[in-house]
Image: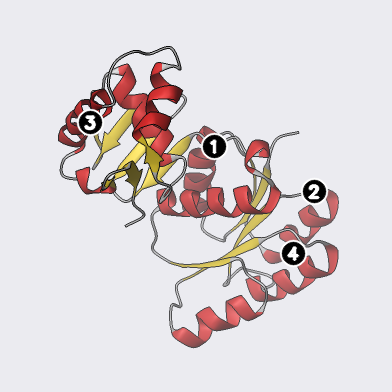
């Protein structure tokens, strides 16, 4: 069984946009347009995560969340046009895993969902297609990389280096670890090969090359900026 997500929003355009992006990521998505229907779906199906607008027709999102909590401990995210501090804190007080203010980027929402699900149900259980950073997207299915929506061309080794770093943000990898993983234990070249590939990778990722940080005397890491 795949990861199943419930999206409840009165705006069909928003629902459909979320579904399109999340389907591309490999998630199963059910859409509902009001709070009463959301509760009916929640009673009938098992969801790994829910995304709800606070201003739902029939029954508001906060009331829906309280009903969800009686049935499951699965995480939920609240969406709202109301971004004042009291509203945000009120959402977290209800138990929301995250609170996102409209209008928002669906890519950003997707990135937040990926983080929540990997933390809650285990990385191996979640089919993650995109590694998403601000201005940098790595599509691990098609092996395509986009910088500010512009496709960049990388060599196979440059791509493998980028993916290895991006899958563990802020983790420092030694040059030897990168060599052993990407080139193989039987590689007889020097670790300066890594430096050359990182230099070329940074050049290709401009102006987002700042994500790749040098750990002096050790190796490299991807920074969470």
- What label sits on residue 195 in the rendered view? 3
Nearer to us: label 3 or label 1: 3
Measure the alpha-carbon separation of dots 1 and 4.
31 Å
Q: Which residue is mark 1?
A: 128
Element class at badge 4: helix
x then y, percent, for residue 40: 80, 57
Is any atom of residue 139 visible in this view?
no
| Nearest to N terminus: mark 2 or mark 3 | 2
x then y, percent, for residue 184: 44, 16
Nearer to us: label 4 or label 2: 2
Residue at 28% in and 47% down? 211
| Nearest to N terminus: mark 1 or mark 2 | 2
Q: Locate the C terminus by quadrant.
A: bottom left
Nearer to us: label 1 or label 4: 1
Q: Residues within 10 Å of mark 1 (few under 14, many from 20)?
A: many
Residue at 49% in and 49% down? 110
| Nearest to N terminus: mark 4 or mark 2 | 4
Q: Is residue 47 left or right of residue 84?
A: right
x then y, percent, for residue 109: 47, 54
| Nearest to N terminus: mark 1 or mark 4 | 4
Nearer to us: label 1 or label 2: 1
x then y, percent, for residue 68: 77, 66
Q: Locate the N terminus by quadrant.
A: top right
Q: Would you identify the image quadrant in which residue 176 lies? A: top left
């Amino acid at each position: 069984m795949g990861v199943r997500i419930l999206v409840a929003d009165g705006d069909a355009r928003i629902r459909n946009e979320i579904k399109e992006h999340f389907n591309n990521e490999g998630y199963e998505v059910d859409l509902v347009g009001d709070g009463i229907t959301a509760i009916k779906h929640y009673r009938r199906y098992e969801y790994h995560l829910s995304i709800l607008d606070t201003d739902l027709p029939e029954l508001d999102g906060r009331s829906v969340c309280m009903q969800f909590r009686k049935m499951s401990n699965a995480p939920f995210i609240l969406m709202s046009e109301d971004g004042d501090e009291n509203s945000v804190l009120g959402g977290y007080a209800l138990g929301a895993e995250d609170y996102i203010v409209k209008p928002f980027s669906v890519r950003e929402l997707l990135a937040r969902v990926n983080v929540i699900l990997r933390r809650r149900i285990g990385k191996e259980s979640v089919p993650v297609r995109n590694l998403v950073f601000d201005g940098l997207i790595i599509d691990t299915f098609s092996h395509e990389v986009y910088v500010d929506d512009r496709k960049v061309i990388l060599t196979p080794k440059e791509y493998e280096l980028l993916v290895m770093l991006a899958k563990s943000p802020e983790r420092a990898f030694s040059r030897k670890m990168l060599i052993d993983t990407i080139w193989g234990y039987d590689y007889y070249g020097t670790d300066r090969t890594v430096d050359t590939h990182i230099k070329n990778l940074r050049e290709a990722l401009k102006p987002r090359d700042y994500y790749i940080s040098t750990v002096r005397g050790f190796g490299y890491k991807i920074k969470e900026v």
